[in-house]
Amino acid sequence: MKRLSVLLLCLALIATLSACGKQPTAEIEAARTAIDATVADGAEKFTPEELKALNDQLAAALEEIKVQDGKTFKSYDQSKNALLKVTADAEALKARIVTVKEEQQTAAATALQEATAAIDEAKAMLAVAPVGKGSLADIEMMKADVAGLEIALTEVQPLIDSEEFVAASEKATAIKEKALSVSEEIRIAQEKAAAAEVVTK
Amino acid sequence: MLFRYFRTGLLAAIAAALIGCSDPPAPPEVQQALNQEQDLWRAGAVVYAPDEYNAYLTALQSGRDYFVREQGRFVWFRDYDAVGAAFRQLLDQGEQVADAARANRERQAGLAADRLARLEERVRALRRLIGSVKDRRLSKRSLVAAEIAVEEARLLVAAGKSAEAQAKATEAEAAIGRLSQAIRPLLSRYADRQQIARWSTLAAEAIAASRRSGGYAIVVHKLDRKLVLYRGGAQVRSYPAGMGFNYLADKLHAGDLATPEGHYRVARKNAASRYFRALLIDYPTEADRRRFAQAKRSGQVPAGTGIGSLIEIHGGGKDGMTNGCVALENPQMQELFDRAEVGTPVVIIGTLNPDNIVAKTLPWLD
């Protein structure tokens, strides 16, 4: 009777140790789904480093599962915990993507506003620039510049709409810089015209 | 007895298995390689050394598989020394990838910076030309498009994004190409040595005639925007002059806002011009009419458009733009008006200077 008890105990122990080892398939699936969701939200564009870290974590967890697969007494606890962390980190990343996206979108919208304002200022200055003697040729050139800037400005909103916020900001900034330089040229032309008027008087 | 042996053996096996479950530490090279891979990715190895990086990734995966296999073996049979050696080799390979990526990134940055510098020079040269020549048809929106693309490329180079900067540089070059296509026909005559020689001959003939007669001759240099007055073959005055909106072209028909080129004479003096004083020249001459007729036959003249007339040298200011006339400052116009007579020769040419700003800038269009 005693012998049988010991034998059963040993068999139960072996059975218990072996039974621990069930692959955490649900956790794997959850982690993959969570990462896919971050990609769908734009992680590749807005938080590529964080996405890479997540994928690396997932790969490490899957590797650990492979290690356990090869063992007689499997324990997937470590992999499971790692996968749960991947899922949690992916959830956190989704919130981070929203923040980054909003920041970039705001920056692009601000850059667009500033560029628009700079062009409007150049146009307003051009409208009252001294036409005629001494400036007509320059004004013709500046009009072409402003027209070119207005065309370039129409390319910014589509970039924002397609969530290319960084490119939109860069283009808007370049447009603003050019518009400011046109305004500066107009101001110099106005000053020259005013000085010429004083001399004439 | 037999059972006692079996029990002892079984307990010993379980104890060994349990002891064997406690893993020895992984070789440190494994984690170092994983960190290295992240560093390579951050350094843009995938962009700057893609072949080397992919080969490295394949080797890394093999190393990781090897490590997994070793981890799966019974603890007594694991050979972590071999795993460590494999990963050390991988770390060396990673260093080479990092070197290749760094070198290529620096090379790409250099190339992008050089290309940008050349583009900036081209855009500056074109801006100088357009600012100096002031023909309305040169004021093209594509120059602004090029300038904006160059500015974007500059921002990208500063941010170390060489590949994106190169793409913007290509965009800028395309805009310059469009500009070039549009303005080259207007400019090419001013870099044509044969054309300049013809203009030189025209001017020389007028000056020689002035020398022979001892009278006045007027030579208008369109590109230099100046009017030179000769008497007895010698220059007596030189005035800055304004021209037509589209003055680079030779006038062909009414409304083209171009200033004509050729040999003319003062046909009439108008002391009560809308533009202070005016010397009407005898445009169109017979040569102009022949050219106009030929252009009309070849469809270069819009239907119902005439050859035009009323080309004058008048006052109103040298900086103003005209519909094809030559404009001087009023005091200088007065001087000229007082000297010129009906019949005074007026030669209008492009330029005498073969190294003019157009000739110098044209190579930047290519």
Image (cartoon, rainbow, N blue to C red):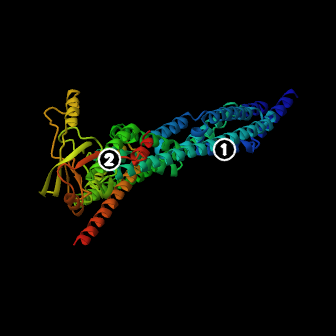
- Taking the image as shown, residue B266 lies to the left or right of residue B121, namely left
Q: Nearer the viewer, residue B341 or A83?
A: B341
- Taking the image as shown, residue B320 lies to the left or right of residue A70, namely left
- Outermost residue on the left side: it is B272
Q: Quadrant of the C terminus of chain A?
A: bottom left
- Taking the image as shown, residue A16 lies to the left or right of residue A164, namely right
Q: Quadrant of the N terminus of chain A?
A: top right
A3 above or below A101?
above
Q: Position of residue B184 (x, y in %)?
A: 36, 39
Q: Which residue is mark 1?
A: B36
Q: Nearer the viewer, residue B203 or A20?
A: B203
Which residue is located at x 58 percent, y 38 percent? B46
Distance, label 1 to label 2, CA atoms, is: 83 Å
Q: Earlier in the sequence, mark 1 or mark 2?
A: 1
Q: Amino acid at mark 1?
A: Gln
Q: Position of residue A62 (x, y in %)?
A: 61, 36
Q: Which residue is mark 2?
A: B208
Which residue is located at x 70 percent, y 42 percent? B95
Q: Amino acid at mark 2?
A: Ala
Give the image quarter of residue B263: top left
Number of labels in the image equals 2
Q: Nearer the viewer, residue B22 or A134?
A: A134
Residue B139 makes an appearance in the image? no
Q: Position of residue B42 (x, y in %)?
A: 58, 45
- Outermost residue on the right side: it is B1
Q: Numbered disc 1: what chain?
A: B
B86 above or below A157?
above
Q: Numbered disc 2: what chain?
A: B
